[in-house]
């Protein structure tokens, strides 16, 4: 620790940091633009000027940029010095000379860092009386608005998009005061993390286009801490609501997981909440003769009565990896353990179980996303992370830069000197090896990408493990050497391939490494999981219950009176034949779900349930970290959380009535969930008496909100479940981040206010809840196990970030970036089969067949056949291999699919990325 | 220069490349470094930083990075400056010879010449000279059996003034935006492609062969005052004989202006002059007896800089002259830091208004504010502080002319 003096007060600081970061860490208000907590300093905007003195005798001092000056021991600075104050006001004055001052119509208004900094720097009256510089805007696609006139040229956008996120289609163009931040030509921003521009831009140049559709000021949004439902990573989000509809999602800082950034699926995928495919009322298919087969609407009361009557007998309950833990627990409690079945496919269940066992194995460690960023050698196995667990991919883009950090440390260049570190390191990256059936979006920063089918990947993994143990050659030896030499090696895979063998072969590499690297406390290995609660359901299944296959067989054979299916499109989880047989064998099928899909249209009784934003719930991420997702706003009265349909709230009974009591009960009774009660907010002291508000202290129009319907002011909904209220009143969140959704601090209205809640910049949230780890390292270390490659097929299933997830695919903005099902083959395979680029092919497997457009790729494993299901194809029908034949060419079809593939952003050539600003 | 430049044969016949032969045979890199350090040679590009000291920051020895670069700053774009052009067009082999000495000293095996794009004649001559040197074994691998390798690559600039800033030059050379870099780290530690790099001006390098051939005492003896060696000095403006001359440092300015440049054209009086190019402060006729020394000019409140004087006569509008410079600097800002990017265009707008009429007294306050706001340390690089030099001195010396513009409805010289 070092000490610095700021305006006469002594602060303890970390001398590895710069003065700006340390001032902010200590809660001082010092304005800035180009600096960003996780992108370091470049000294462009000159806003953070302070006066620095050489020593106590120096009364003159010089104005320096605090972001570019190390917080060296003994440094004496002044923020309040008149020359520094004047400098900062001059900077803001010139930043504003061409700014349109259109705050009243700007969507950044009210959460604008530029507004905050202008206030803080004391610029009020305009002296510049010449013409402003104006720009033409670009259409950047369905996610992002572009309003260049607001730009203050802080360069954060390109530093984030190009340098941090690896984008290639946004650049600083032009020069002097005509510098322009946009694409070389108008078009959709391709990078999968483009949405963070909305939060990185300090003003309203890049704003959320989906939010524009139903815009509301930040202070008028009702918000609550939530968890992203896009995949199993567990990123923390803040959804915002107004007038009963979900308006947007922004990032919610989590130190260990998402940090400051989300992927575009997580940010823009919320649109399904207001989709017209949303199930908004309970309905039943009549069995009366006169109206047989007609679906009739039910009141909630009648629906509940029907539900209770229909499911009084011998009932099968099928859970869901995308339903909350509470809903799954409630279903389990209702039908009994012996009637409770997993809601994922057999292969998913086996894979998840294998992952849990590995997550429990001593000597191994499941890294959080922040730890992944610190890895200095990474092996990615099979998983196309950019498309399945995108936040991991963004983390790995940072991990490859650890080589740069090392070089900078050797050259004594501080890590916060962002441009200098990138310049020094150039293209030198930490080793990243990828094993994949096809080229991935991370290949540009990979040392090598091995293109192989599941079988050949398993083969290579075996060779790597052997090479680690001592005998190897070629690529396997190269990878082994890199893993052996790394300080923090990490292995990342997932369950997309649906192959337990691949998972075991991957774990074998970690096991081999553990044996050779006793210096490591544990070897980092993690598996991306597809759905927000895949891990939660897998853990629940450890406490008893059957597989989906067993459930479907039982139903098909008529051994149940009814089935309750919770939030699940089973057509995605088993073959069409198995599903058909089960449905026809089920006298009464009850489905609880949010969105109409191919499965629940066949339900006799369909019960509408709330979405993640309309309910409280616990979700368990890939690490086994349980996190609370809070209800953002009261849902329409017809909608209920799954657990509420399953366990009707009885005001007189105290047992199993709310999400909190369900969780508490399971934590007490089910070993797999021991410790989950830590998630429940403390109810001591003042918190026992007051709830935390979901509405900001500036929330406007509450009493008039529904005056167009009824002038009587409606009573605010009472939240009887959680520690939060649907109100502006309650326990203020200042300095306590345990229920923090939208960060705000005096003078800090933008998301940059988060620094006021961190114990230091980029640190933990003060009193924040990071979740409860449910998995303990309880299993002894395993030796590498033998793995067979007999069961693997040459068919692999392609994932896409946009459209690849059941719910977000329904969001209009996501749909605009999605493509339909297609077949992907290599050139040799296409030639052999007579397939034409963007032509059509017939695929068949047993009694199943489908006709798909064809994508011929350069970078695909020899002999591999890729299928993207796109919500149109049942993957289980074709998993065991397909036969392919060309379909006669048709010009119109060719043109249509050509257009479709234009939307697809893939890497089909390896252009190793030149780091740094191009 | 009227004669054609020497080809390699003529150049060697006249004693060219003798320094390289001497150096490779008899001197270790450290010897050359000491020699240059002790010679007192200061950079001729404008900043006047001691060359040997600059070189001494390059990591040397076993543990030093293997790849290092020498880069010649031949992007001569300072307004009023045309001295490097003269050297490259008149004696291209002299530059190559100097480069070999510098590259050998820091043990760089690749050297780049970053040449102003408009210098087409220099480009042709340098290309030819490099090929000649190659053919005579003065470039390439194992030069003259010394074990030292050197390749020289000529790069012509796409043309921005900011490329004369050494780190912006490096970015441009790498194919990136020509934005300057933060210092530290200095190029000597992390320069071109992140490797140790020395960037020297053309004229600086052209001093080296003489120093190696004739030694420190000889070189120091060339200067008349405190500074060692000679300097190319140019004069432009309404003088009888504008041009460029090599003069001993320490020569009185009056000698340059009146003897070499022939004095003011008939009917014109000297009003003021910028002693070292567009980004230096105005000096006045009373300063004519000062000598061309870095410190002497510095004490008078300006800079020797490139040593190329721009003369302002009594029948040219000083406000218009400064306005012209402001337009240039504004346009040449790279757009990276706020004061320069947004401050200079504002100043430019004000000067345009002075010219057309409509200037305000409050504009003077804006200009005065910008002097400090765009001053040294406030901006990312030296471009804007350089621009403030003529502006600040003009506001001091030509207050009445500004007053006439504001209160007389525009430029009095155009009424």
Image (tube, rainbow, N blue to C red):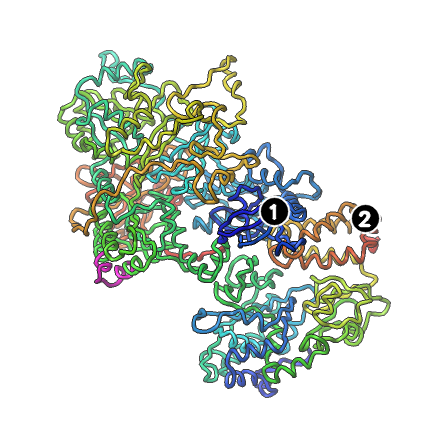
Where residue A246 sits: x, y (%)?
44, 28
Residue at 51 percent of width and 34 percent of height: A744
Mark 1 neighbour density, 10 Å: few (under 14) some (14–19) many (20 or more): few
Q: In the rendered structure, does residue A34 fall within the stretch colored magenta?
A: no
Residue at 27 percent of width and 48 percent of height: A364
Neighbor class of circle 2 (other Cα within 10 Å; few <14, some 14-19, many 20+) is many
Q: In the image, what residue occupies the spot 66% across and 74% down?
A: B86
Helix, strand or loop at label 1? It is: loop
Q: Which residue is mark 1?
A: A8
The answer to which quarter of the image holds residue B379 is bottom right
Q: Which mark is drawn over residue B406?
A: 2
Q: Residue furthest bottom?
A: B13
| In this rendering, position of residue A396 left or right of residue A833 | right
Is the residue B98 above or below the residue A357 in the image?
below
The numbered mark 1 sits on a residue in which chain? A
Please state which of residues A601 and A787 is positioned toward the viewer in this rendering. Answer: A787
Q: Position of residue A690 (x, y in %)?
A: 45, 23
Give the camera-side residue of B268 and A357. Answer: A357
Nearer to the camera, A436 or B215: B215
Q: Is residue A190 above or below residue A587?
A: below
Which element carries disc 2, helix, strand or loop? helix
Residue A679 in the figure: left or right of residue A309: right
Q: Nearer the viewer, residue B191 or A555?
A: B191
Mark 1–mark 2 distance (CA, rounded to whole Å): 45 Å
In the rendered image, is residue A398 in sight?
yes
x, y percent for residue B185:
53, 61
Report the magenta residues as a range: A465-479
Quarter-wise, where is residue B213 in the image? bottom right
Q: Nearer the viewer, mark 1 or mark 2?
A: 1
């Amino acid at each position: 620790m070092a000490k610095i003096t700021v305006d006469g007060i002594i602060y303890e600081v970390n001398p590895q940091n710069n003065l700006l970061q340390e001032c902010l860490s200590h809660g001082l208000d010092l304005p800035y633009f180009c600096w960003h907590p996780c992108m370091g300093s470049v000294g462009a905007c000159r806003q953070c000027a302070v006066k620095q003195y050489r020593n106590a005798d120096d009364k003159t001092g010089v104005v320096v940029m605090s972001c570019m000056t190390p917080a060296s021991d003994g440094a004496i600075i002044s923020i309040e010095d008149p020359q520094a104050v004047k400098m900062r006001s001059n900077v803001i004055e010139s930043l504003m000379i061409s700014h349109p001052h259109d705050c009243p119509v700007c969507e950044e208004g009210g959460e604008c860092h530029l507004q905050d900094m202008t206030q803080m720097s004391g610029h009020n009256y305009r002296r510049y009386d010449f013409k402003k510089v104006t720009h033409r805007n670009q259409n950047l696609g369905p996610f992002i608005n572009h309003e260049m006139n607001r730009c203050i040229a802080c360069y954060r956008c390109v530093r984030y998009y190009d340098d941090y996120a690896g984008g290639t289609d946004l650049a600083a163009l032009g020069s002097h005061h005509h510098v322009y931040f946009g694409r070389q030509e108008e078009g959709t921003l391709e990078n999968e993390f483009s949405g963070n521009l909305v939060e990185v831009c300090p003003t309203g140049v890049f704003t959320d286009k989906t939010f524009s559709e139903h815009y509301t000021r930040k202070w008028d949004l009702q918000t609550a801490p939530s968890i992203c439902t896009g995949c199993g990573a567990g990123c923390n989000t803040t959804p915002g609501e107004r007038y009963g509809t979900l308006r947007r999602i922004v990032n919610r800082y989590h130190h260990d997981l998402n940090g400051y950034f989300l992927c575009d699926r997580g940010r823009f995928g919320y649109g399904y909440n207001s989709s017209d495919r949303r199930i908004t009322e309970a309905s039943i298919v009549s069995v009366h003769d006169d109206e047989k087969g007609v679906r009739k609407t039910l009141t909630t009361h009648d629906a509940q009565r029907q539900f209770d009557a229909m499911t009084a007998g011998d009932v099968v309950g099928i859970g869901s990896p995308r339903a909350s833990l509470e809903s799954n627990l409630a279903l389990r409690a209702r039908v009994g353990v012996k009637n409770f079945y997993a809601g994922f496919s057999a292969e998913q269940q086996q894979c998840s179980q294998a992952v849990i066992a590995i997550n429990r194995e001593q000597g191994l460690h499941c890294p959080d996303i922040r730890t992944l960023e610190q890895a200095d050698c990474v092996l990615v196995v099979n998983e196309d992370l950019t498309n399945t667990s995108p936040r991991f991919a963004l983390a790995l883009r940072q991990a490859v830069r650890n080589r740069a950090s090392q070089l900078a440390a050797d050259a004594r260049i501080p890590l916060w000197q962002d441009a200098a570190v990138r310049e020094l390191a150039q293209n030198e990256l930490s080793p990243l090896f990828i094993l994949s059936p096809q080229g991935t979006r991370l290949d540009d920063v990979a040392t090598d990408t091995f293109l192989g089918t599941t079988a050949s990947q398993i083969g290579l993994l075996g060779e790597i493990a052997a090479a680690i143990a001592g005998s190897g050659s070629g690529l396997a030896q190269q990878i082994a050497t890199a893993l052996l030499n790394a300080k923090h090696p990490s292995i990342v895979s997932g369950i997309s391939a649906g192959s337990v063998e691949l998972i075991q072969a991957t774990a074998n590499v970690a096991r081999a490494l553990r044996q050779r690297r006793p210096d490591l406390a544990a070897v980092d290995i993690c598996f991306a999981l597809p759905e927000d609660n895949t891990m939660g359901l897998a853990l629940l299944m450890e406490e008893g219950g059957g597989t989906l296959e067993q459930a479907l067989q039982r139903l098909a054979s008529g051994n149940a009176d009814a089935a309750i299916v919770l939030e699940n499109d089973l057509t995605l989880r088993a073959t069409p034949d198995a599903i058909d047989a089960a449905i026809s064998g089920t006298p009464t099928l009850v489905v609880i779900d949010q969105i109409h899909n191919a499965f629940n249209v066949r339900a006799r009784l369909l019960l509408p349930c709330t979405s993640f934003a309309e309910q409280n719930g616990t979700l368990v991420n890939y690490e086994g970290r349980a996190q609370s997702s809070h209800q953002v706003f009261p849902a329409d009265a017809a909608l209920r959380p799954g657990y509420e349909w399953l366990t009707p709230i009885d005001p007189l009974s105290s047992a199993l009535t709310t999400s909190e009591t369900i969780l508490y009960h399971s934590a007490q009774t089910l070993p797999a969930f021991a410790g989950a009660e830590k998630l429940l907010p403390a109810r001591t002291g003042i918190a026992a008496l007051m709830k935390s508000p979901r509405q900001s202290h500036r929330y406007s129009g509450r009493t008039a909100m529904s005056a167009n319907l009824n002038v009587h002011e409606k009573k605010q909904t009472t939240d009887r479940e959680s520690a939060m209220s649907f109100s502006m009143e309650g326990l203020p969140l200042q300095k306590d981040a345990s229920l923090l959704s939208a960060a705000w601090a005096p003078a800090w209205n933008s998301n940059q206010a988060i620094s006021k809640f961190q114990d230091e910049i980029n640190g933990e949230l003060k009193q924040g809840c990071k979740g409860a780890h449910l998995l303990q390292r309880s299993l002894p270390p395993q030796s590498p196990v033998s793995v067979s490659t007999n069961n693997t097929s040459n068919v692999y299933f392609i994932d896409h970030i946009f459209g690849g997830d059941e719910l977000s695919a329904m969001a209009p903005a996501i749909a605009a970036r999605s493509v339909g099902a297609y077949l992907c083959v290599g050139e040799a395979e296409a030639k052999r089969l007579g397939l034409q680029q963007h032509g059509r092919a017939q695929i068949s497997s047993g009694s199943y067949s489908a006709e798909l457009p064809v994508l011929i790729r350069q970078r695909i494993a020899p002999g591999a056949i890729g299928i993207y299901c796109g919500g149109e194809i049942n993957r289980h029908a074709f998993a065991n291999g397909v036969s392919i034949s060309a379909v006669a060419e048709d010009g119109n079809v060719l043109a249509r699919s050509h257009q479709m593939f234009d939307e697809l952003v893939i890497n089909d050539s390896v252009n190793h990325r030149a780091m740094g600003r191009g | 220069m009227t004669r054609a430049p020497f080809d390699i044969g003529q150049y060697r016949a006249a004693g060219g490349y003798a320094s390289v032969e001497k150096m490779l045979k008899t001197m270790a890199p450290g010897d050359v470094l000491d020699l240059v350090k002790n010679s007192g040679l200061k950079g001729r590009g404008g900043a006047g930083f001691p060359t040997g000291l600059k070189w001494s920051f390059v990591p040397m020895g076993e543990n030093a990075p293997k790849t290092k670069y020498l880069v010649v700053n031949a992007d001569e774009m300072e307004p009023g400056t045309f001295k490097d052009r003269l050297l490259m067009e008149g004696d291209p082999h002299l530059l190559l010879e100097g480069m070999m000495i510098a590259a050998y000293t820091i043990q760089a095996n690749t050297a780049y010449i970053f040449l102003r794009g408009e210098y087409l004649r220099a480009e042709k001559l340098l290309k030819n000279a490099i090929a000649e040197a190659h053919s005579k074994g003065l470039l390439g691998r194992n030069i003259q059996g010394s074990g030292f390798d050197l390749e020289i690559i000529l790069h012509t600039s796409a043309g921005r003034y900011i490329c004369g800033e050494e780190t912006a030059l490096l970015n441009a050379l790498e194919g990136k935006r020509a934005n300057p870099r933060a210092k530290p780290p200095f190029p000597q530690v992390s320069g071109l492609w992140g490797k140790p790099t020395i960037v020297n001006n053309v004229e600086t390098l052209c001093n080296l062969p003489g120093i190696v051939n004739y030694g420190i005492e000889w070189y120091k003896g060339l200067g008349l005052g405190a500074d060692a060696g000679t300097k190319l000095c140019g004069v432009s403006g309404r003088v009888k004989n504008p041009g460029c001359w090599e003069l001993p440092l320490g020569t009185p300015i009056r000698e340059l202006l009146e003897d070499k440049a022939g004095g003011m054209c008939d009917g014109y009086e000297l009003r003021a002059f910028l002693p070292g190019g567009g980004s230096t402060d105005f000096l006045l006729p009373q300063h004519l007896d000062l000598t061309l020394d870095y410190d002497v000019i510095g004490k008078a409140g300006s800079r020797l800089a490139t040593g190329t004087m721009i003369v302002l006569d009594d029948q040219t509008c000083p406000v218009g002259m400064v306005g012209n410079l402001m337009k240039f600097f504004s346009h040449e800002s790279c757009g990276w830091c706020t004061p320069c990017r947004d401050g200079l265009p504002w100043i430019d707008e004000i000067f345009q208004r002075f010219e057309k009429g409509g200037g305000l007294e409050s504009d003077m306050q804006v200009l005065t504010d910008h002097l400090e706001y765009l001053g040294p340390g406030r901006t990312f690089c030296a471009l804007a502080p350089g621009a403030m030099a003529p502006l600040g001195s003009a506001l001091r010396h030509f207050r009445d002319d500004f007053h006439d513009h504001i209160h007389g409805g525009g430029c009095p010289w155009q009424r």
